[in-house]
């Protein structure tokens, strides 16, 4: 078991595998969403993948190290506490985890030189935290898959 999440990325092929799993997680979460805010998120996703082919995959790959870094304090606390799954642990701290993960996406959007990306992100940013919180158990499972 890794104590430092960034060490996972030292394993050959780990970044690509985590990126692929993260993309699948996002697509699964999107497919299971309904309602007005979900429609906006789906539209933003479609805009990004249509107008900037390859950008989404590249962005997820760039975000993985930053997301692991943001999750590191929670992982350390989880290891010290023991028991249960990392996803369950993150859910208990979702008021902290959601903003930590949003910091990564906020920074990526802020640094983007693609106006369509920035516009799409701004359109969904208001509801982003609730969508991220809904995905927290799956995010925890993904991290635990590679860190355990």
Image (spheres, rainbow, N blue to C red):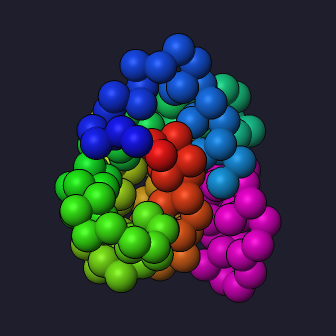
Is 45 within the magenta?
yes
Relative image position of residue 123 (x, y in whole percent)? 50, 64
Q: Is residue 57 above or below residue 141?
A: above
Q: Main secondary structure of the magenta part?
A: helix
Quadrant where the N terminus sits is top left
Find residue 23 and report its image quarter: top right
Relative image position of residue 5 (x, y in whole percent)? 34, 39
Asked if residue 21 lies left or right of residue 144, the reply is right
Number of marks in picture = 0
Q: Residue at x 36, y 82 (%)?
A: 92
Asked if residue 132 lies left or right of residue 96, the reply is right
Relative image position of residue 143 (x, y in whole percent)? 48, 49
Work out which residue is located at the far top of the displayed protein and give it. 12
Find residue 64 and report its image quarter: top left
- The answer to whether residue 65 is visible is yes
Q: Which residues are magenta?
A: 26-48
Q: Residue at x 58, y 18 (%)?
A: 13
Q: Residue at x 74, y 81 (%)?
A: 34
Relative image position of residue 33 (x, y in whole percent)? 72, 75
Find residue 55 and report its image quarter: top right
Of 137 and 48, the residue lying toward us:
137
- The answer to whether residue 114 is visible is no
């Amino acid at each position: 078991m890794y104590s430092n999440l960034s060490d996972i990325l030292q394993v050959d092929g780990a970044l690509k595998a985590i990126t692929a799993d993260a993309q699948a997680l996002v697509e699964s979460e999107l497919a299971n969403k309904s309602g007005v805010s979900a429609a906006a998120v789906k539209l933003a996703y479609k805009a990004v993948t249509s107008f900037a082919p390859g950008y989404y995959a590249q962005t997820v790959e760039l975000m993985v190290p930053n997301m692991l870094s943001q999750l590191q304090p929670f992982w350390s606390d989880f290891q010290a506490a023991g028991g249960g799954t990392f996803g369950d642990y993150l859910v208990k701290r979702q008021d902290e985890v959601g903003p930590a993960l949003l910091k990564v996406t906020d920074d990526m959007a802020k640094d983007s030189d693609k106006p369509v990306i920035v516009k799409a992100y701004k359109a969904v940013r208001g509801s982003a935290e609730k969508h991220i919180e809904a995905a927290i158990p799956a995010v925890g499972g993904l991290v635990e898959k590679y860190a355990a």
